Amino acid sequence: MDKKGNAVDKFNFVTMEDLEKNIQDFHKKEEEDQTISLVPTPEVVNVDKNSFDENHEVFQEANHLNDSAVEEKPHKLSRKLYFSFEARVAAMIVLILAFFGGACFLILEALNFGNKETVSYNEVGSASYQVCLTDSEYYGTGCLQEGMEYLSSLVDTIRADLEYKVDFSTDIEYDLAYHVLAITKIADKTDSTKVLYRNEEELVGRTDISNTSNVIQIKENVAVEFARYNKTVLDYKERYAVDSASTLEVILYLDEPTETRAVASLIVPLGDSTFGITKDVTENLNRSVSIESDTWNSYNTWCAIIATCFIIISLILLFKTTRLVLKVTTNRNKYQTALTNILREYDRLIVIARDGYESNVEKKIIKVESFNDILDARDTLEKPIIYSRINDVKSEFIVEDDEKLYKFVLKESDF
C-alpha cells in the first residue's frame, strides 16, 4: 500500500457509545481535577502530575509538552474568515487609485481659475432731493419736496440723496469704488454739443468698496450750493452776453476696473428765473453676466487641503502595499521550504486533511511552540499528526487526544 494509505490507517475510529462515554468521563474528571481551568482568557498550563493516575504514563510525559503550551477555552476547531494575499493587495491598489484619483480631481478644482460663471443680478440706481430756501416767508418751511418748480432767487441749497444697489445671485469678489461730482456746464442754446464752459467739483472723493459679497450698496447724502453755482452762470452770461443753456449735474460715479460710469444723477438748470430738477438713474433688472474666477478663495483652499491629505494617504498605502509584497515574496519561499521539508521528512507520521479538520467534540486546545513538541505529543499519545492547510501562508499540525487537542501553527510571518 502507498504512503497515503498507510497514513490513513493510523486513525483510531470509535463508536458513538464510546464517544459518549469519553465525554462523560471528561466532565467527571473536570469536576475532580481542580487544576484544570476553563476560563476564557488564555493562560499558560502547568500540568500537576499528582492530579493524575500515577500509573498513567501518558500524562507524565505530557508534562514536558505543557511547559511551553497555552490553554484556551474548549471549542471546536473551525476555519476563520481569511482574506488571501492577492485579495488584500487588490483592495489596497483599489484604495490607492481611489485616493489618488480624488486628489487629482481636487487639485484641478483648486487650480481652476479660468472658469466662467454666469451670475444673475438686479442693478438699481436712484436719486432723491429736497430744495432748501433762503427765504421761506411764502412757503412756511425751510425745504421743499421734489417734483416742483422752484424760484431760483429763493433757493439756497439742494440736498441730494444718491443711492446704488446691486443684488447678485451668488457671492462674488468685486474691486469697486465710487465718487460724486458736481459738473457745471454752459453750452450753446441751439447746439448743446458746443460747450462754452465746463467745471467739475468733487463733492465726495474716491471711496473704495471692494469686498466679497452678493450685495453692493452705496448711499451718499450731499449738499449742493445751488446759489453759488447759479451766480457763476449769471455772471458769465452778463459778462459775455451769450445766449446759452446752463446746467448743474450732480452725478454718482461707479469706478470699475475697466471703466467709470454714472449710475445716478440729478440735472439742475441754471441761469433761469425758475427751474425744475430731473433725474437720470440706472435700472437693470433680471440681467446676467459671465464672471471669470481668477482669485483664490476658501473653496480653492479646502480643495488643496483635502487633495494633500489624499496624496499622503495614497503614498502611505503604496508604501504598505510595496512592503507587504516584498515581505510576502521573500518570506513565502522560506515558509514553503519549511513546510515542504516537514511534510517530506515526517510523511509516515502525518495524515493530510484535504478539506481542513474540525473536531466533533469540544476539547481543550493546547498550542505548542514548535513542531518538535507536536512530535513529542505524537510519540506520547501514539496518535497521528493531522496536517490542515488553512491558506497560502498558514498551516496547522494537530495531535488529538481524548480530552485535548495539541496544535502547532506554522505561519509565514514566523520567518
Image (spheres, rainbow, N blue to C red):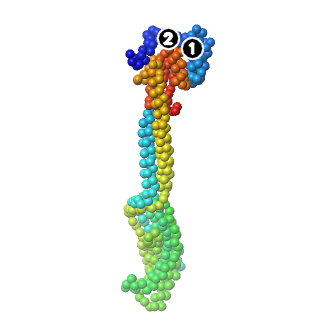
Q: Residue at x 47, y 90 (%)?
A: 238
Q: Is residue 168 visible?
A: no
In the rendering, at what x and y percent does residue 412 appear? 49, 32
The number of callouts visible is 2
- Residue 367: which disc? none
Q: Nearer the viewer, residue 4 or 31?
A: 4
The residue beneath circle 2 is 22
- In space, the residues marked 2 and 1 are separated at their CA atoms by 16 Å
Q: Label 2 crowding class (10 Å Cα cut-off): few <14, some 14-19, many 20+?
A: some
Q: Quadrant of residue 127?
A: bottom left
Nearer the viewer's eye, disc 2 or disc 1? 1
Q: Amino acid at mark 1?
A: Phe
Between residue 270 and residue 34, name the one nearer to us: 34
Q: Secondary structure at mark 2?
A: helix
Name the residue at 42% across, 72% down.
280
Residue 198 location in percent, x, y?
A: 46, 83
Residue located at (49% from left, 57% from top): 297
Question: Foreground: 52 or 392?
Answer: 392
Residue at point 53%, 22% (across, down): 372
Vertical side of 32 occupied by 147: above or below: below
User: Which secondary structure, mark 1?
Assistant: helix
Q: Quadrant of the N terminus?
A: top left
- Residue 131, placed above or below residue 211: below
Q: Is residue 201 above or below residue 382?
A: below
Q: Earlier in the sequence, mark 2 or mark 1?
A: 2
Kind of residue at disc 2: Asn
What is the x, y in percent for residue 7? 43, 17
* Depth order, front residue of 326/212: 326
Query: What residue sits right under mark 1 in the picture?
Result: 59
